[in-house]
Image (cartoon, grey):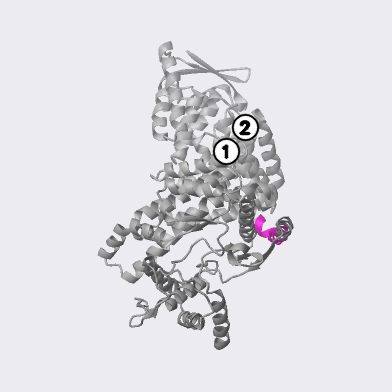
Amino acid sequence: MALLIVPLKQIILDPSNLIDLSTLPEPEAIRLIKESYGFLSASLDVSIRDGLAVIELKEERPVARINDAQKTFQKGVREAQQGDYRKAIKTFTKVLEIIPNHVDARRNLAMAHLELGNVAKAKEHLEECLKLDPANAWSFVLLGNIYAKHERNQPVAEFYYEAGLTTSPNDNILLNNYAALQMEQGNSVKAKKLFERALVADSSYPNTYYGLAYLYQINREPAAAIAILDRLFDQPKSSDMRSESVYRNARALYLELSDELARQDSTRLMGLIQEKKSELEHAAGQRISIEEDNSLEYVSAVAQMAWKHGRDEHRVRYRMKSEAVTPHLVAHELEHIVLEQQARAEGRNLFFVTTAETRTAAVHSVASHVSKLQQQGYAEKNIAEVIPQLIHGLCNQIFNCPLDMVVEHNLYAKYPELQRSQFVSLHQMYQEALKAFTSPEIKKLTPPSIFRASNTLNCAYALFIDHLYQGRTDYSSAYRSSEIFSTGKNLFDIWKKQMEVFQPGDEYALVDEFARLLKLRSWYIWKTDDVPDLSVTELPSATNTVPLTTDKPEAYIYCLDALRRFDGKSRDEIFAVASEIGILGMNGIDHTSEKTYSLKAYPGETFTGLSLLCLMYVGFKLYDPSVNSGLDFAEAYEMALEAHKAAVH
């Protein structure tokens, strides 16, 4: 026989029509109690003694069955934690068939129904929980939530929260949810106090941090809001699956707040970067110029090293992408200069170069895909444009990925003031990478080996960002179910291990490690720092070793002709011409004889080797000014450019 003793004043029959049973005649009170507690058993006795309802359940259960029911309850809890609510409902129902007054089983059953959207059933079970245990804080919480969020009945919701706090004044869940109700009603002061009390009661509950941060945001206090979220992410993550949506919302809010703060602080950050630039100039004895250049189309910022371009200064050019991210983009390029200066000081600086041989190897590796595109009817011109561009892009990526991870790691540690701008900027990079991973059209057109390698590098970079921001991002989850994830994880682990003992110049060894794992080591070579005027991409060289100089008037004429040809052309059209010459140059271009060449881009015309190289040189200059060929056409190009501008204007 089970016995329940409940104070009459605490029995809630109907929250919208409260009745004090202690004021009713005893027979009427007993009748209402029997009706209310009939869910426990068909046979029960009720008596009233000194303001207490004494409820006796006549049915008896064997001890063995009671023990089995307790084990079954634990199974149901595990199922609910794993998100399998339908199974959990069946399991908790079995428990209640044996122990109908099992409050925890009934409350968990209600929660499972609520997760599946069965609000009426959840409310019914929770009201029964309060009849069994009028001091059960969780039941007050959940009923308050139902009336606040599902039935939009705020007075009844407030009743349940207040009633719960009467018996459990330090329950963090009650405090948190009551605070959320007060915030929704516009009572910011009371909401803030309740959230703060909830954090004192339990500092591990993620919902409270998110709620308080959101309150600060709507009160236009973004710095306070992001500080609260930092506290959330700096503690161990909750293992409860029901908290996943809270973390997703917290990450989205963190990004929004970071963007707002970075925009507000943009002017100060650009001033800080100018200070850092001056410090670098003084330390290295090399001037650095920082210039806004909104003609940059496919890159947001670029650093040009003085020793690669025959100048007396390093140059950083950037496109004003947004106030939030521009400080980070400029700082990123400055840190690239720092890395190269440090490697140079140790005699370990290297130049990443592609040659005719490495490009040939790259083209051969995707030959089968080119044939497939041809069979599918793609135009030869389109293939000639896309394939070299994809190869060039992957070469840049294999070089930049590990270096950028080093750069961002350094920026995060050295410049805490920049972290909001950095966070927003890296998020945009992640979004761009994700488009390439999820686009069916890109996957269809891209050779599988290039697609896998590129997205594996993006996966490694996503893991790096997650590592850097410790819970504030979850970018790697987009790749987790893909076959590339394990290789991406290996790349990140290689980088992480190297950073434990990192020395200037080690970044180039990281490039090689990444390339070997991706089977791309034959796609580039290294040249030492004593080779002048080389860039990340070295364009095709001539077959004849006679040096190309600009003391020939033909070079000026050919460069001027190229500028006229490209005038008014799109960037893609210019790249198509330069790439066609690049592919042709894999077998060498003779600039010393009268041998002529033809181009699909200009049917019916022929070109000497020198004119072809000038056309290619100008094309790549217009496509990306940071790319240098190693050909000595700079003087002829500058002269032709001045003449062309004068003629146009």
Q: State the residue at coordinates (31%, 59%).
A: 367
**Quarter holding residue 211:** top right
- Residue at image location 39% in from the left, 29% down from the top: 90
Question: Which image quadrant for residue 289?
Answer: bottom right
Q: Which residues are magenta?
A: 261-273
In whole angstroms, how far apart are the C-alphas of marks 1 and 2? 9 Å
> In the image, residue 97 lies at what x, y percent?
40, 22
Is residue 264 magenta-colored? Answer: yes
- Secondary structure, mark 2, is helix
Residue 602's spot in the image, x, y percent? Answer: 37, 80
Report whether 291 appears left or right of 145: right
Q: How many marks?
A: 2
Q: Which residue is mark 1?
A: 144
Q: Is residue 163 visible?
A: no
**In-front residue for pair 164/462:** 462
Callout 1: SS:
helix
Residue 42: x %, y % from top left: 42, 21
Residue at image point 59% right, 45% down: 469
Is residue 275 one of those drawn in magenta? no
Question: Which residue position is annotated with label 2?
Answer: 164
**Picture coordinates of residue 295 (x, y %)?**
56, 72
**Sequence-earlier tag: 1 or 2:** 1
